[in-house]
Amino acid sequence: MDKNIVSRDGTPIAHESAGRGSVVVLVSGAMSTGATVAPLAAPLSERFRVVVYDRRGRGASGDRPPYAVEREVEDLAALIEAAGGQASLYGVSSGGALALRAAASGLPVRHVAVYETPYALSEEDLRERARYTERLTEALAEGRRGDAVELFLRLTGLSEAVIEGARQSPLWAGMESIAPSLAYDDAVMGGGGVPVKLLASVPAPVLSIAGDASPAWMREAARAIADAVPRGTCRTLPGQTHMVEPDVLAPVLAEFFTR
């Protein structure tokens, strides 16, 4: 990231942009930085000015307690203002929940596209999310960053063997370094259920996407988002999982953002 803007509370937010045209801001999900969505910026920048940023508390961006979801919405407001005053948003996973919250807050957002925003649909899943929130809060309060990362990885469905392998990976230290931001994504998800009232207040057109190789509940959550917003469309991408291929996703986003 080669530039900083200062958010309303004084937090520096690192970002970079590429391309020309109408603005598209890419919003990453949990355990990720702007580098995670940067591969998508390359194909999109052929038609748009694409802004990639590190969400607060991760990468090259700063942080300033106490955290509130509203601060992350203000970060997006500052980015949009610096980019010309209007933008479309794309959010992946919990970044989709942040993009939807930003649009519902009244920011000048033209379109919102989200990929596999993991809202829980069943009572059992909601109870699991509540247990995760409790244990995550405890682990972070006690400084057990590695345990916090493990909790998140279990929530995503990874096996104990895969998690143990991750602990031995050179990438583990980087994961621990941004573990406190897991609490931010948990707050953005707002308890985990579909926020029907909030989604009903999103004025922009919304495209909710899922991969057909992902678990069925991901596709059901994508449909629930499209049904809850006033101007929603749902789309399924053949052969795609939660780790969607940028070259498959980019044409779908480009078509939506140019409507």
Image (cartoon, rainbow, N blue to C red):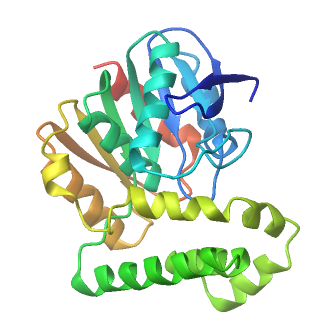
> In what quadrant of the picture does the C terminus appear?
top left
Q: Image point 45% across, 64% down: which residue?
A: 186
Q: Residue 127: x and y, percent?
A: 31, 85
Residue 77 in the figure: left or right of residue 227: right
> In what quadrant of the picture does the N terminus appear?
top right
Q: Image point 45% across, 20% down: which residue?
A: 80
Q: Residue 74: x and y, percent?
A: 43, 33
Q: Residue 82: x and y, percent?
A: 52, 14
The answer to whether residue 93 is visible is no
Q: Image point 70% across, 76% down: which residue?
A: 143
**Observer-nearest of 11 and 103:** 11
Q: Is residue 204 above or below residue 215?
A: above
- The image quadrant of residue 229 is top left
- The image quadrant of residue 112 is top left
Q: Is residue 161 above or below residue 169?
A: below
- The image quadrant of residue 30 is bottom right
The answer to whether residue 67 is visible is yes
Residue 48 in the figure: left or right of residue 43: left
**Observer-nearest of 20 and 72:** 72
Q: In the rendered picture of this protein, how many numbered marks are placed on residues?
A: 0
Q: Image point 66% across, 65% down: which residue?
A: 179
Q: Residue 218: x and y, percent?
A: 35, 66
Q: Is residue 129 above or below residue 15?
A: below
Q: Is residue 111 above or below residue 49?
A: below
